[in-house]
Amino acid sequence: MFFGSYYTCENEGVMREKSMNELPLMDENEGIVLFYPNVPENALEEVSKVLHSRWIGQGPRVVAFEKEFETRFLTNNTALAVGSGTDALHLSYILAGIGPGDEVIAPVFTCTATNIPFLYMGAKIRFADIDPETLNINVDHVRQLVNTKTKAIVCVHYAGLPCNMDELLKISREYNIPLIDDAAHALGATYKGQNIGEITDFSVFSFQAIKHITTGDGGMITLKNRDLVEKAKRIRWFGIDRSAKQNGHWENDIYEVGYKYQMNDIAAALGLAALAKFDETLKYRQQLFSEYEKQFSGIDDIKLIGTGLTDRTHASWLCTVLVEKRHDLMNKLRSFKIESSQVHYRNDRYTVFGGRRSDLPNMDMVEDKYLVLPLHGKMKPTDVEYISKVIKSGW
Ligand SMILES: *Cc1c(COP(=O)(O)O)cnc(C)c1O
């Protein structure tokens, strides 16, 4: 059957960690896996309907998925579905006007998907440090890095906890540059009563295999500026205006380079099925997270990341703890058939990003301490109790 960790967006990282630790990936029947895809009961029927219809490519289900997404999460912004979260990130960077040689401020601690598209574009990444309390982007460091050459700021709501949006928005307005939030972990999260997806110029969501909602692979970009919607649609499809083409006129010249970044109707059918159940999904994940919080409260050796902020809600995608002797804890968990992993690695560890930076003291401090524990819809609150009990017995 499926092996939870194969679904992380940085499988390469997981494999590397595995070889370091000699921990094979676990079978779900063996114990408690880290991730499990969320495919609701009715998904099969929804997909089957699409497969028996005329449209399996980008068609009416994609439009319906975008509309449903807007209904659930947005009041002003426009949602456009794409083939992956990475597609959505790249598209947002293009729409933000980033070009070769431009400087961007981006989080160092995130999925490589956040930063890889900058390499497609020849942009210059200035990695911002983390806040050691939340592992989100450190606003003070963003302030130090920002200058007149900065073309955009990107943040990621790590684990599902929103960043300090007011302060980031303030910087983006001061310098008149777009703020883009990678919200791949944060579907359903809120900040001061506003949904993530509504706050910035561009928000990006992922429906990759292990995210809150999965479409196999898929993503969504939400746009504040309506004037960019038509351009975004063109770039999603080679640079061609698909609606003009379908009217039979020769109005489909290509003026700008586009990509093949659309979502298809098979994926959208999965998305619609999962969206219909999303409130339950989110509530359940939050319940499991709260159970972890309850279990670890008052325990000095385990610091649960992302608690204690009352002005925002946590989408509970990951449960991350800071511990000493992480590898020992991982080994102990494995001996009790509990999977754990780093999931993401500081991106400057990858050669392709130009090598390790020396101005990221908080990242240096937590780099060997953070660990992600299982959190997904197939788990029960009693599994959290069990995991916590194993951890609390020492390592
Ligand atoms: C999953 C993820 C993405 C997007 O990944 P895709 O696999 O391209 O959908 C982007 N950023 C973060 C932080 C992620 O976790």
Image (cartoon, rainbow, N blue to C red):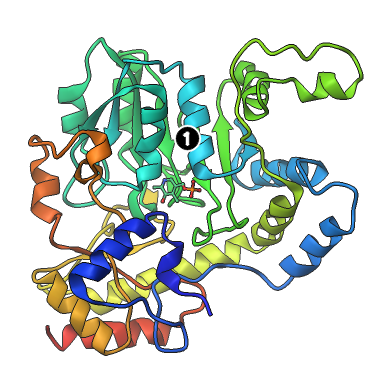
Residue 198 percent across, percent down from the top left: 52, 35
Residue 2 on image: x %, y %: 51, 75
Give the residue type at disc 1: Leu
Quadrant of residue 226 within the rendered picture: top right
Mark 1 lies on residue: 89
Residue drawn at (69%, 53%) of the image: 267
Instruction: Inspect this view and state whether residue 314 appears.
Output: yes
Element type where label 1 sits in the image: helix
Which quadrant is the C terminus positioned in?
bottom left
What percent of the width, then of the height, locates residue 288?
41, 73
Q: Is residue 252 left or right of residue 159?
A: right
- Check the image and report above or below for 146 versus 36: above
Q: Nearer the viewer, residue 258 or 365?
A: 258
Mark 1 residue CB less than 8 A from any atom of ligand 1: yes
- On the question of residue 201 being in view, the answer is no
- How many callouts does the rendering have? 1
Residue 320, percent from left and from top:
28, 63
Q: Residues within 10 Å of mark 1 (few under 14, many from 20)?
A: many
Residue at (16%, 50%) from the top-left corner? 132
Q: Which residue is located at x 56 percent, y 52 percent?
A: 207
Q: Is residue 97 left or right of residue 124?
A: right
Q: Is residue 88 above or below residue 144?
A: below
Residue drawn at (44%, 72%) of the image: 4
Q: Is residue 299 left or right of residue 34?
A: left
